[in-house]
Amino acid sequence: MSTYKDLAELIFPDVKKTIKDLEKQYPPRDLKEGAYVTRFAPSPTGFLHTGSLFTALIAYRFAKQTGGVYFFRLEDTDQKREIKGTGEDLVNQLQVFGIKSDEGYMGDHEEGNYGPYQQSKRADIYKIVIKELLKKGRAYPCFCTKEELDQLREVQNANKVIPGYYGEYAKCRHYSIDEQIALIKEGKPYVIRFKSKGNHLNHVRVHDEIRGDMDLSENDQDIVILKSDGLPTYHFAHLVDDHFMRTNLITRGEEWISSLPIHIELFDTMGWARPKYAHLPVIMVNDAETNNRRKLSKRKDKEAATSYFLESGYPIKGFIEYLLTIANSDFEAFLLNNPKADIDTFNLSFEKFSLDGALFDLPKLNNISKEVLANMDKKTFTDQCLDYAKKYNSELYELINKDRDYFESIINIEREQEKPRKDYEKFSDVLPKILFFYPDHYDQLIKNELPFNEFIKKDVIIELLKDMKENISLDTDENTWFNKMKEIGKQHNFADDRKEYKKNPQAYNGWYADAISILRIAICASTQSPKLYDVLKILGLEEIRRRIDSVVAKLQG
Ligand code: GLU
């Protein structure tokens, strides 16, 4: 009679190493108390999804804030779904968002002592572990064909029993070792399954750092651990990897809770310490058609791709801050109270995690982003704006590069002060708002109709502007300049007192705010602008006079 050992040797004759060897090769890490080893473990199946960035961010920050290690592992065992090149893209995209791995798969190379960090390169390691499971009788070859499995599912559906490969339905589990050996020798293709000892009527208690204790039905499924292509499935691979990479905190999407009992049984069977788990809430949206909440979808939502936020010109810091508000309910208050603080001084906590999927909130992102842009110093703003423009907006790129100092002086209006002006939500807002500062563009803009108040006579506007042109002075402080404008207005019958004007509007052409507005429109080709005095200072007297002349000529023309 053959033994489990004979079966293991038949299947893996070349595997000589043992789990003990692996334990030695990948020793426990030397960590300080409370330090987390976390990982981001995506499959290379496409672009960086917003939900994945969120997951990576959480893993990254828990490692960083505890003085631990964050690494990147590429889970590329499903070669049918793999899209070539996306592993490297994911690494690069995460870097753009400031998430740099301490070790792991880096795209074109690897770093760290716990590799390989690419699952397809770890086949030998998995085989060592599976060989031991076979020896212990906790794994077995399964020869069922796809047709047999389909048929099993049909029978189970018809009988309304839980589908899957388990207990009495697990045909190959019941073969004797001799039968298994004979079938292998016959050359029948097979996969390897884990032999579960669970019973789904029993409960297993698992602690989740966010959700607390969860009582879940035990696993009883004999899951496939090694596929016919020689690569393991996710359930098994992550177990081996997280054990030998010494991950002590698994942060991943809540969609994995349902398979948690499998993972728990696997860890317990191996006699390996269970890592801590934190299953993260999924980012949701309100479906525009059904008005129901649903997961952010790759196919339906532009917000599902992180690249959308980069192309739209959101500052990276703003987007990260927004994601942190999804993570922890007290982060927003932290931001409000410390608008200039380094966000790395905020520590995430599991207690403050929201449990239900967070609803993606674009207005909130816009507000946060506006705050971030307003609080940047002019150099940082310009550097980041240039980065954005280089990739997505060539006109803006040229404008900045033509005269960076000029650009900086424009965007510095009411910046670098206690309560900075909040002009922009994203870098894509910059160009239309600053175009008028550039004489060539201004000349184009005033070809359109100018938004002067239609109740003020054209002649009045012309005379007022002419007078302003002659008497404007920028050598004074803002107050003196303003009073001077008011005084000129008064000479053209614009009331210098609002109440006076309101009492008797017919007696006046307007009040002084109307007079200032006329100047603003003439200079900026818009009723809105940053502080006019600052605008005038940047343009200089000569350009101001040129602009007034152009507008007067247009009005007279
Ligand atoms: N490769 C899995 C995924 O793409 C990783 C899940 C995990 O973090 O363990 O979702």
Image (tube, rainbow, N blue to C red):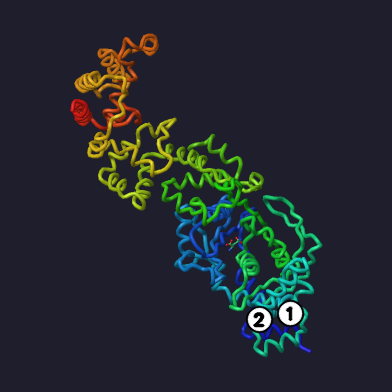
Is 122 placed above or below 303 here?
Answer: below
* Location of residue 346 in the rendering, given as x and y in whole percent from the top left corner: 56, 43
Is 122 placed above or below 504 here?
Answer: below
Q: Is residue 192 visible?
A: yes
Residue type of the residue flagged with mark 2? Tyr
Task: Please tell me whether mark 2 sits on a helix, a strand or a loop.
Answer: loop
In-image side of 407 versus 43 (left or right): left
Tell me the residue that label 1 is attached to: 172
State if disc 1 and disc 2 touch (CB < 8 Å).
yes
Q: Looking at the rendered structure, which numbered label has been put on residue 557? A: none
Q: In which quarter of the image is residue 180?
A: bottom right
Task: Tally the numbered discs.
Answer: 2
Distance, label 2 to label 1, CA atoms, is 10 Å
Q: Earlier in the sequence, mark 2 or mark 1?
A: 1
Is 142 placed above or below 552 here?
Answer: below
Is 82 placed above or below 36 here?
Answer: below
Ligand number 1: quarter of image: bottom right
Point 81% across, 62% down: residue: 202
Point 50% across, 47% down: residue: 320
In-image side of 481 versus 36 (left or right): left
* Front-most of residues 33 and 483: 483
Residue neighbourhood size for the residue with mark 2, other residues' Cα within 10 Å, grouped as few (<14), some (14–19), many (≥20):
some
* Location of residue 258 in the rendering, given as x and y in whole percent from the top left corner: 69, 60
* Location of residue 523 in the rendering, given as x and y in whole percent from the top left corner: 27, 29
Point 71% across, 73% down: residue: 194
In-image side of 199 versus 230 (left or right): right
Residue type of the residue flagged with mark 1? Cys
The quadrant of the rendering that contains the C terminus is top left
The quadrant of the rendering that contains the N terminus is bottom right
Task: Please tell me whether mark 1 sits on a helix, a strand or a loop.
Answer: helix
* Location of residue 438 in the rendering, given as x and y in whole percent from the top left corner: 26, 38
Tell me the residue that label 2 is attached to: 190
